[in-house]
Image (spheres, rainbow, N blue to C red):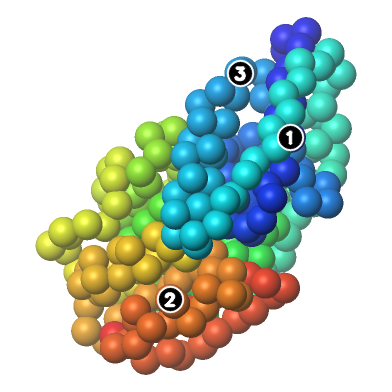
Amino acid sequence: MRDYYYEVTITPSSHKEEIESFLMDHFYNGIEEVGNSLILRSEEPLEDIIEKTKEYANALSKIFSEKVELDIKIEKKENQDWIENYKKSITPVEVEEFYIRPSWYEKKETKIDIVMDPALAFGSGHHPSTLNCLKIVSQKVKKEDKVLDVGTGSGILAIAAAKKGAIVDICDTDELAVKEAKKNFRLNKVEFNKAWIGSAVNLKEKYDIVIVNIVADVLVFLAKDLKSCVKDGGYLILSGIVEKYLSNVLERYNDLKLIKKIQEKEWITLLLAK
């Protein structure tokens, strides 16, 4: 462990939910939410994620025709084992038949065991978007189903599907995410079929279930490609949708049948059938 770590506090002028969702997809060391601020900590400098977040804020500014400003505070602090303190705050999550736990907790014999250590806090089952996807995975994924997890992140949703006997493919535009997902597959002693850095654009393969837990504007942008890789009679699980953008998403997927909508706070997850 190093003597110092970096702490970055990002306070957006507006569209905090979108910024939070973006960071969930691009930062894997845990994010603390304090009021309107999002706090990132790492023993490595965070210039890369800061620049990516600035670029995303500029994109939001263009989309919504309003200036989205970021107040960014960077501090170098003495390392007092904040990782261990953070670990203590993470407890297991029980979702339908799944039991998601840090490795230092014992598994439950009556549940499907998924181990996710808190260095990957988002995608650990604690965020509503992930939790509600897990509910639908539990209800809909069957043995031998072909499943694609787009924007896999930590890999938790794909791992859950694999634990149910599905044949799973994973992809993410972030190379680090794909590496972390592969590591978590090994940790959970399950296998994926294929993995690639990228998205679901121009895929020839058809899947029984496609899972996409990413920001709403990307769901809108990828709508044609996501729908095209679902088999007739198959399902599309869309999550990471902030309530105020629900109508935009539904409009782009109005040729599919809405089977279920799950909402927790401002976060919405949809189950659609083709």
- Name the amino acid type tagged 3: Pro
- Which mark sits nearer the N-terminus, 1 or 2? 1
**Residue identifier under label 2:** 249
92, 213: nearer the viewer: 213
As measured in the structure, the alpha-carbon distance from the residue carrying label 1 to the one carrying label 3 is: 13 Å
- What amino acid type should be assigned to the residue bearing mark 1? Thr
Front position among marks 1 and 3: 1
- For the N terminus, the quadrant is top right
Q: CA distance from mark 1 to mark 2?
A: 30 Å
Which label's residue is closer to the chain start, 1 or 3? 1
Direction left: furthest residue: 204
Q: Quadrant of the C terminus?
A: bottom left
CA separation in Å, label 2 and label 3: 35 Å
Residue bearing mark 3: 45
Q: Position of residue 49 (x, y in %)?
A: 54, 32
Could you say which quadrant of the image residue 175 lies in? top left
Q: Position of residue 151 (x, y in %)?
A: 41, 52
Q: Is residue 192 above or below residue 162?
A: above
> According to the image, label 1 marks what residue?
9
